[in-house]
Image (tube, rainbow, N blue to C red):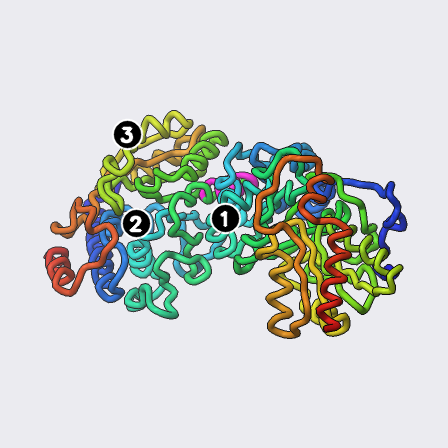
Amino acid sequence: MLTDNELKKLEVTANLIRQDIIEMLLEAGSGHSGGPLGMADIFTALYFHILNHDPVKPDWNERDRLILSHGHICPVRYATMARSGYFPVSELKTLRKLGSRLQGHPHRGSLPGLETTSGPLGSGLSQATGLALAGRIDKAKWRVICLMSDGEQDEGNTWEGVMLAGKNKLHNLTALLDRNNIQIDGFTEDIMPLNDLKAKYEAFNWHVIEIDGHNIQEIIAAFDEAKAIFEKPTLILAHTIPGKGVSFMENKFEWHGKPPNKEEAKLALAELKH
Amino acid sequence: MINPKVYLNPKLFDPDIEQVPSRNGYGEGLVLAGEENEAVVALCADLTESTRMEAFAKKFPERFVEVGVAEQNLVTVAAGMALGGKIPFTSSYATFSPGRNWEQIRTTICYNNVPVKVIGSHAGISVGPDGATHQALEDLAIMRSLPNMIVISPADTIEARKATIAIARLSQPCYMRLSREKVPVVTTNQTPFEIGKAEVFYEGSDVAVIATGEMVRRALLAAKEMESHNISVRVINCHTIKPLDKDVILKAAEECGAIVTVEEHQVTGGLGGAVAELITQHLPVPMKIIGIEDRFGESGAPDELLIKFGLTKEAISQAITHVLRMKNK
């Protein structure tokens, strides 16, 4: 458990990251708002507490491997990486611009610290599974963490990865599913009902933990629990609010794939700074 | 005449020449590559025996991953293993991999630029009775268009073995196509093999025939036959479709002044396309592309299909006469 002071510090950081996201998206003029804001608490917990990593040595071999499967939420990853010391915060303003290391969807070859390239949905979990298999062969101590969206549970490739990880009892793999119930065209249960995700993953031999994805104590406790499960990979089913922290964006699928304009950004920042 | 420096099989023109599927050489090469480097791992999508991964799986069970009938998973799991420092070989039939999982290969292997080796068995019309669904005729085109990808099409089982060992040593993504059917063994252990280097198998100066895969021997038979008509044909074995050996091909265009390409693949985007892209921009000469003419295959015996679809010694001889006429106009 974090002390009250430690918790407060992480919450302040998450808020700062949300402000970065708004500023980056305004500057870029395109990109996704809902998902990045909704995942800010999880990214903060990962980079500032859970992950074994070194921002000064991004390719340190003992680091935990964080695969971001739904690459379109990369503004939150970039902002969190900058805030934790991978690169200057000022570079965030280059997002999506010509020559930038911060590509519109993350590219491994462009920015040190990204484990893979992503954007096309549904292939992150399989790569994480491959990494976990490689780690097991080498008896490595590092762990693999894969973040994915609920929308990409529509992809067959995702379930191919689910089956293989379950079959191989990859306990060095923890996946976190951002259950925010929206995708581009609408609410997930209208577009393609996902039904009982917990039961589905359990049926494929996964250990499942359900949490509030904005409660940093719960996020940390879930990753700790995953480390203690030795027979199965773990899925953290994290319920989040898309657009979290900006009231007019919260729970609106219309904010999945667009950036704020100048006026909206001003309102959003005022609310976050309040 | 046969180029003595490439040490081809002395029984090259005998009707009873030894015949072996090129997938066999791959299976042997994979075990050798695995012995040479313990980072080599293998993944298969429920076709372990027929893609010839069995020997590797038996010898290195801890380095073999069975993913089930899931070709998208096959290559994305391999990409992940490569991110973890491994050199993964993936096997399936070419219509499924790289046929079904092209975007995953594009993003997670080529754009990531990791050393995954995509091996597509059952390439070409000679797959035979299984029919068009299992006859890969587009694989070279879809793999050749991807940045960072190396594309190999070996002439026989010995070359497939050498190519397997060679691509295991490369830190780049590679695609290699293999035959299901028995293919005449054209080369020997002494035949030079280097990725990116085409070899002149038959020396000649009137027309150059650039062939790949099973078509190499048919091109050699055509060259020998044309000799009796006083036409001197150069035959080039082009086992690396990408990067193409520009020097050898432009030299052939310059010295022979006419080119025929032959492949068991659509005429769109394969070896012929690659050669045309090169020579039209640097040294245009009359050219004819022999391949499958924008259609699907069908069931039949391999030899029957090769005749029906015009991939024969006779078709090559006709094409040689055709480009020679164009050249002399």
Instruction: Pinpoint the chain carrying mark 3.
Output: A
Q: Residues within 10 Å of mark 1 (few under 14, many from 20)?
A: some
**Label annotation for residue A261:** none
Q: From this viewpoint, is residue B253 visible?
A: yes
Magenta residues (range): A128-137
Report if the CB atoms under discs 2 and 3 are less than 8 Å apart: no
Foreground of the two, A212 or A220: A212
Q: Residue visible at 26% across and 38% down? A: A191
Residue A77 in percent (x, y) is at 32, 54
Q: Residues within 10 Å of mark 3 (few under 14, many from 20)?
A: few
Residue B2 in percent (x, y) is at 86, 59
Instruction: Identify the amino acid type marked 1.
Output: Trp
Badge nearest the viewer, 1 or 2: 1
Badge nearest the viewer, 1 or 3: 1
Report the Cα–Cα distance between label 1 and label 2: 31 Å
Instruction: Identify the amino acid type marked 3.
Output: Asn
Foreground of the two, B288 or A71: B288
Instruction: Identify the amino acid type marked 2.
Output: Phe
Q: Which residue is mark 2?
A: A43
Badge nearest the viewer, 2 or 3: 3
Instruction: Pinpoint the chain carrying mark 2.
Output: A
Q: Secondary structure at mark 3?
A: loop
**Label annotation for residue A195:** 3
Q: Quadrant of residue A218?
A: top left
Residue A274 in percent (x, y) is at 10, 56
Q: Secondary structure at mark 1?
A: helix
Q: Which residue is mark 1?
A: B102
Residue B236 in percent (x, y) is at 75, 60
